[in-house]
Amino acid sequence: MKRTLGYMLLTILLGITAYFTFLYFATYSEGVRAGELIKVSHKGVIFKTWEGEMSQGISGAQIFSFSVLDRDKKVIEDLQEMQGQYVKVTYVERFRTFPWWGDSKYFVINVEKEKSPFNSK
């Protein structure tokens, strides 16, 4: 009886460990999006995370919300500097996120200034 209970607990523990390991390392997709960077903020009460929004339409009808991990200091600095400008971001999408990572499943890993297709200057 004790041996069976031990195996059951070990199986449950290994399953939980495998699940969180998968969430931590696996990505669902990777991609690039371009638009006007309209918001970058450091928010949260218990867990402070970097969150941003990018407008992908003329009237702002399509908003791309994303997070940035704290360890990506260069990306955070670039986003703050380029706020209000047209940018191209490279991101990874995760299956789920942890509260200390951010609100979104999309995590920006690189940002570049891009020429706006709406301005003819």
Image (cartoon, rainbow, N blue to C red):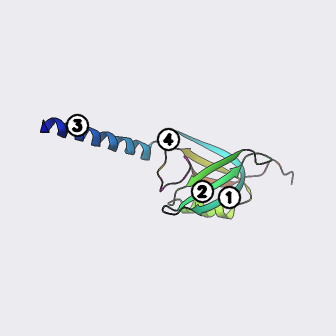
* Residue pointed to by mark 2: 51
User: Is 2 situated left or right of 71 in this image?
Assistant: left
Q: CA distance from mark 4 to mark 2?
A: 18 Å
Q: In the structure shown, which secondary structural element does the residue marked by tag 1 occupy?
A: strand
| Sequence-first disc among 2 and 1 | 1
Which residue carries the number 4 mark? 95
Q: CA distance from mark 4 to mark 3?
A: 27 Å
Kind of residue at badge 2:
Glu
Q: Rounded to the nearest whole Å, what is the CA distance between mark 1 and mark 4? A: 24 Å
Q: Which residues are magenta?
A: 99-106
- For label 1, the residue is 39
Q: Residue at point 66% right, 47% down?
A: 64
Using a 10 Å C-alpha cutoff, classify the residue at mark 2 as few (fewer than 14 neighbours), some (14 to 19) or many (20 or more): many
- x%, y% of residue 10? 23, 41
Q: Is residue 9 above or below residue 112?
A: above
Q: Earlier in the sequence, mark 4 or mark 2?
A: 2
Give the Cα distance between marks 2 and 3.
40 Å
Amino acid type at image mark 1: Lys
Q: Most prominent secondary structure in the magenta stretch?
A: loop
Residue 57 in picture, x, y percent from top left: 76, 45
User: Which residue is at 43% across, 47% downward?
Assistant: 24
The residue that label 3 is drawn on is: 8
